[in-house]
Every structure is written in structure tokens, then in C-alpha cells.
């Protein structure tokens, strides 16, 4: 290190500028997330889950995870849970519904497995003021629904999301699940800070999100949602949550994230290399949606400028991230040259070692909220660093393969165009072939967008009021066993 003053490291200036810029903004996000506060549950809420909430679950699975998730949803006492599946899965899912709660759960079908068609069919079957979409493995705390309903007291709010955490599929987390948990920790910070800074959010996650039904009943929404094409050629099936979030922005609705333990869902992730296929699908969806938001629809620039900035940052991120290793490689290569020929005095191992220490320290700092709960995961920080560079390359690959619109991790997902045509034929047969086709429902009052809303109710959620008493677990608790893990209580 004594030779540093004898070498000219101008090559490091771009790296220093990029590093300063990135960690300045990360510090701003951390500060914003720290001062962020969720909206508290009112004593006399306008919306009561037992009267105003329908949970829609598009799925092609009927496993044990689904049964556990359904129990956690029922604790919140929604008015109804509608499972939308393909015809061949009707029997197994009806058996599951009967085993869990036949009075609250019903099963509807579509001709082919297609998530957007399943969701749109569920919307048409809904008669409550609020729709909550949920993945079939999303585990909720008992306070989830009242917490999600609280932001809807503001009649300008059209969609609400939550924070998330990972629970292992097995007895312990694999490295893939830890990587997913790291990503969710960073995401929770990002969405909390974005909500505090300008009220926007990059995406209301499809794992669990709530919307005003009147927005989704709009025929224009239903048509656009099920006839969404990339470059007017490639029919999209995934990316439903991105579409919903963009629709909120483009139609003047506010969104809010309830980032707190009372509204934190637990979800499983792929415990093996198939997690990478999930990430690739999500990355393609992000590219498509962000490019549309920034350069085609452009509402994001005026309504949520901070979110627009984060989208631009993500566009350039893979390029800036890969600059570091390239500069380090150049310096290391030059360190092998004799000083007389323009080489550096500083040994190559000193350069490389300093860079690796810097990487480990900064990445560990970003993951402190997760490591506070699970300090044992610090051994996976090197894997997270490697994944970061792999992810940068994956993002570039995804950019050049946006025409690939397949699901990637699930077999049996039908062609989107064929499924849409089959669904249109089924609905043309009337209610007998396609289920309820109503487009409206009685509501009271009028909001600023010219649509109806309910009136405040006398019932309170205080002391657990409003929760489904019949929906308890084997130990008599209304809390899913995963929430009893000490790491989730921190």
C-alpha cells in the first residue's frame, strides 16, 4: 500500500463515481424506509373483510401448501374465496375447498390454464367492493386483511400491496431460497422508501395485492388485461401485476404499500436452480413494463418522478455493475507488467483483495435488515455477490429475448391467444357457460373518480374483532406456525 502514491489510478475514477452515486441513493432509500409508516387500521373502518372482500386465487395446483395458505386467508374472514382453475383440476380443488371451508370457498374454471384469463374470470364473478389477488402459496398473518383495507379509507387509493418474506420449502433454507430472501429484503426497503418519497411503487406484487373492484370491472380494463401484446405480436400471460400497477398510474389512482409485520406475507420460492428461471421471467416482465411506462405511456414521469428515476436506474444498472469487474481486470492485468513498461507498483493480489473486501462490506451493509433476523445467512453473502453479476448478464440476455413470453417454471400453461379465444367462446354461451357476467354491484356514496364506495361501519377490528373464529390451526392459534419462528418476530 506504500506504493499507492507512485501509481496513477485514473482508471478508478469512473468506478468511484458510480460507487458514490449508487450508495448515496441507497442511503437515501434507507432513510426514507426508516421514516416510512404504514397506515393504521381505523377504529370504525369503511370496509369490513366479511362483507367487502373477495379473494381471487388463480391456480393449477391443489397441494398441501395451498391448503395451509387457504387456512391463513380464512382467519381474516373474507366474504368469499374464489379459486379459478382449468377444467381438469376442478375435482381436486373442489375436494380441497370442501376439506377447508365449503361455505367460503368456491371453484370456477376456464377452458385453459392462463393466469390473466383466470383472474379476469374471477373479477367477473366478484360482487364485493374489494378484490384481493393471492398466490396459492401465500401465507398471511391474521391482521393482513384489516391492514390492507386501511389505505382504502382514502378514496383516491385504487391498489394496495404488502411486504414479503420467504419461508423454506424444507426444514432449512437452501442457498437459492436465501438469495430470494435477500432480494425480498432489498425490495421491502425499496417499496417502503418509494411509498414515502412520492407515493408510487414499481409493482404491486402479484403474490398478494388488493384493488377496488369497480376499477377492474371496467370493460376497457378487462379487454386490455386479456389482450396485452408486446410489440403488437407476442401475447402476454405473465406480468399481470405489472399491468395492474401501470393501469393504476395511467388512470389516476393512487397506490400504497403496507410494509409492516402485520401485513407481511410469507411465501415459498423455488429451492433449486429453477429459481433462476423464475428470475428470468420476472426480469423480462420488468423490462417490458418499465419500457412501456417510461417511453410509451409516460404517465409515470409526472405522477411518480421518483419511480421513473428508479426505472431508469434499473435500465442502466446491468451496464454500470459490469464496469467494476472490467476495470479491476484492467488494473490486475497492468499490475503484471514491469514498472518500467508502464505497470503498477501495487501487486495484483492487493488490488483484487481490496476490491473483494469492498464488495463483501458493501453488500453485507445492504443486507443488514435480513442478517439482523438470520445472522447465519452471512455465509451466503459471497453467493449473493456472484448472483448479482450473473443477474446483470441475465438482464442483458432478457433484454434481447423479450419476445419469449412463456411461463418458464410451470408446465401446462396454455397458449395465451388460444386460451383467450376459447374463453370468449365459453362466455358467449351466457351465464351457464361462463359463470356470472355481471359488471356492476350496489355500492353507496361517490368518490372523486365518479364511482361508488361503501360507508363507514360500526364494527371494529380492535381486539381481533372481524376475524374468522372458525379458522384456527391445530394448536388453536389464529397464527400460521411459520410466524411463531423467532426470526420473524424481530
Image (spheres, rainbow, N blue to C red):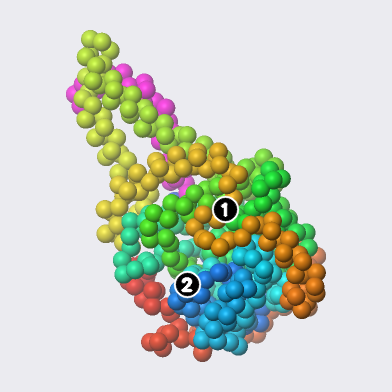
- Out of 39 and 385, give the one closest to the viewer: 385
Estimate the x, y position of residue 466 in percent, counting from the top left: 57, 84
Estimate the x, y position of residue 206 in percent, counting from the top left: 56, 62
Q: Earlier in the sequence, mark 2 or mark 1?
A: 2
Above or below, 424 against 202 in this view is below
Secondary structure mostly taken by the magenta-highlighted segment of the chain: helix
Contact, mark 2 vs mark 1 (Cβ under 8 Å): no
Q: Residue at x 30, y 44 (%)?
A: 360
Relative to 397, 414 lies left or right = right
- Residue assigned mark 1: 406
Check disc 1: other Cα within 10 Å, few if <14, some if 14-19, many if 20+: some
Q: Secondary structure at mark 2?
A: loop
Q: Residue at x 59, y 73 (%)?
A: 88
Residue range corresponding to the magenta coloring: 1-29
The quarter in which the C terminus is drawn is: bottom left
Count of numbered circles in the view: 2
Q: Residue at x 23, y 10 (%)?
A: 340
Q: Residue furthest left?
A: 2
Estimate the x, y position of residue 205 in percent, counting from the top left: 55, 60
- Out of 341 and 65, give the one closest to the viewer: 65
Q: Residue at x 62, y 78 (%)?
A: 107
Q: Is residue 6 visible?
A: no
Disc assigned to residue 446: none
Q: Is residue 297 magenta?
A: no
Q: Is residue 13 magenta?
A: yes
Estimate the x, y position of residue 92 in percent, counting from the top left: 54, 79
- Residue assigned mark 2: 139
Mark 2 or 1, closer to the camera? 1
Amino acid at each position: 500500500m506504500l506504493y499507492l502514491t507512485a501509481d496513477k489510478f485514473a482508471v478508478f475514477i469512473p468506478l468511484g463515481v458510480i460507487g458514490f452515486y449508487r450508495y448515496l441513493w441507497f442511503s437515501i432509500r434507507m432513510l426514507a424506509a426508516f421514516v416510512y409508516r404504514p397506515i393504521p387500521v381505523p377504529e370504525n373502518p369503511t370496509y369490513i373483510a366479511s362483507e367487502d372482500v373477495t379473494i381471487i386465487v388463480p391456480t393449477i395446483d391443489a397441494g398441501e401448501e395451498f391448503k395451509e395458505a387457504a387456512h391463513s386467508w380464512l382467519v381474516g374472514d373474507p366474504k368469499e374465496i374464489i379459486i379459478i382453475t382449468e377444467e381438469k383440476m376442478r375435482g381436486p380443488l373442489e375436494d380441497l375447498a370442501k376439506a377447508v371451508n365449503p361455505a367460503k370457498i368456491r371453484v370456477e374454471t376456464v377452458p385453459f390454464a392462463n393466469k390473466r384469463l383466470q383472474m379476469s374470470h374471477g373479477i367477473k364473478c366478484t360482487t364485493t367492493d374489494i378484490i384481493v389477488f393471492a398466490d396459492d402459496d401465500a401465507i398471511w398473518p391474521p391482521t393482513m386483511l384489516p391492514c390492507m383495507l386501511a389505505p382504502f379509507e382514502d378514496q383516491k387509493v385504487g391498489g394496495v400491496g404488502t411486504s414479503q418474506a420467504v419461508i423454506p420449502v424444507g426444514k432449512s433454507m437452501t442457498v437459492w431460497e436465501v438469495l430470494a430472501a435477500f432480494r425480498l429484503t432489498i425490495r421491502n426497503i425499496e417499496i417502503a422508501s418509494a411509498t414515502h418519497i412520492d407515493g408510487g411503487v414499481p409493482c404491486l406484487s402479484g403474490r398478494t395485492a388488493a384493488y377496488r373492484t369497480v376499477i377492474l370491472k371496467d370493460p376497457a380494463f378487462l379487454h386490455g388485461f386479456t389482450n396485452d401484446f408486446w410489440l403488437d405480436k407476442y401475447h402476454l400471460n405473465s406480468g399481470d401485476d405489472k399491468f395492474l400497477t401501470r393501469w393504476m398510474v395511467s388512470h389516476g389512482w393512487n397506490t400504497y404499500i403496507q410494509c409492516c409485520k402485520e401485513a407481511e406475507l410469507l411465501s415459498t420460492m423455488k429451492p433449486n436452480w429453477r429459481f433462476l428461471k423464475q428470475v428470468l421471467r420476472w426480469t423480462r416482465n420488468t423490462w417490458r413494463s418499465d419500457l412501456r411506462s417510461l417511453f410509451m405511456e409516460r404517465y409515470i414521469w409526472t405522477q411518480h418522478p421518483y419511480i421513473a428515476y428508479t426505472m431508469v436506474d434499473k435500465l442502466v444498472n446491468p451496464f454500470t455493475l459490469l464496469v467494476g469487474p472490467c476495470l479491476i481486470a484492467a488494473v490486475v492485468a497492468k499490475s503484471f507488467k514491469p514498472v518500467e513498461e508502464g505497470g503498477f507498483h501495487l501487486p495484483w493480489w492487493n488490488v483484487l483483495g481490496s476490491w473483494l473486501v469492498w464488495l463483501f462490506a458493501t453488500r453485507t451493509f445492504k443486507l443488514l435488515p435480513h442478517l439482523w433476523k438470520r445472522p447465519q445467512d452471512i455465509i451466503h453473502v459471497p453467493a449473493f455477490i456472484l448472483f448479482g453479476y450473473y443477474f446483470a448478464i441475465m438482464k442483458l440476455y432478457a433484454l434481447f429475448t423479450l419476445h419469449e413470453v412463456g411461463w418458464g417454471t410451470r408446465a401446462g400453461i396454455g397458449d395465451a391467444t388460444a386460451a383467450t379465444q376459447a374463453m370468449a367462446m365459453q362466455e358467449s354461451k351466457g351465464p351457464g357457460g361462463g359463470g356470472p357476467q355481471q359488471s356492476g354491484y350496489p355500492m353507496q356514496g361517490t368518490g372523486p373518480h365518479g364511482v361508488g364506495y361503501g360507508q363507514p361501519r360500526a364494527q371494529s377490528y380492535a381486539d381481533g374483532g372481524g376475524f374468522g373464529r372458525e379458522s384456527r390451526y391445530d394448536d388453536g392459534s389464529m397464527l400460521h406456525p411459520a410466524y411463531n419462528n423467532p426470526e420473524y418476530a424481530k
